[in-house]
Image: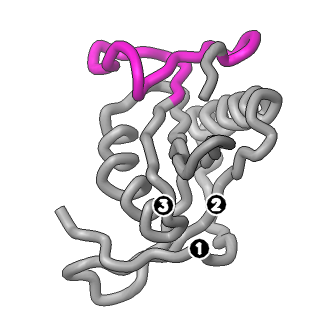
Amino acid sequence: MTMIKHAQRCEKISFPRSTSPRTLAGLRYERQVIKALKKQFPDLEHNPWFEYFGEGYDSTKVCSPDALLFYKDNNDVIVVEIKYTYTPQALEKLTALYCPVVALATGRSPSPLVIYKIATPMTPIGFPCFQWRGNGPLGFTL
């Protein structure tokens, strides 16, 4: 695993997105989750962009977690990845890339959270994974 040595915020970068039905369903679900999260957490930051550099990299890379939820009473932040169907790669990406980058770029202490609609046999039970089927309030607080 590469160690992230430097990270900072950067301008939004647009990449072409797939138009497959599966991708479009995932993007619709992400919009639903963000809308529900904003009701509970008005300070939510959706798709923040960061650039980072690590050991063994020949150039600067960029990444964008789905959301950041800020605690009001301390310096912590929850880094959120949203998936239509749970995949273990989401939690791996959060812990290996997004959380270290967010920590270096913001000076805050990050915690990972995967929000998903459909569970799989590989889905862990409990935090840092949370199932939301798309109806009603999210049902968790900071």
Q: In the picture, which quadrant includes the C terminus?
A: top right
Q: What stretch is highlighted in magenta?
A: 115-138
Q: How busy is the neighbourhood of tag 1: few (under 14 within 10 Å), some, or many (20 plus)?
A: some
**Vertical comparison of 9 with 133: above or below:** below
Count of marks overlaid on the render: 3
The earlier-in-sequence mark between 3 and 2 is: 2
Which numbered tag is attached to residue 137? Answer: none
Spatial CA distance of label 3 from label 2 is: 10 Å
Residue appearing at x 52%, y 25% in the figure? 116
Dividing the picture into quadrants, the one containing residue 24 is top right
Tell whether position 117 is magenta. yes
State the scheme by which the image is colored. one colour
Question: Do callouts 3 and 2 mark residues in contact (Cβ within 8 Å)?
Answer: no
Q: How busy is the neighbourhood of tag 3: few (under 14 within 10 Å), some, or many (20 plus)?
A: many
What residue type is disc 3 on? Val
Residue appearing at x 72%, y 45% in the figure? 44
* Residue topped by disc 2: 48
Which numbered tag is attached to residue 102? Answer: 3
Which numbered tag is attached to residue 9? Answer: 1
136 vs 69, nearest the viewer: 69
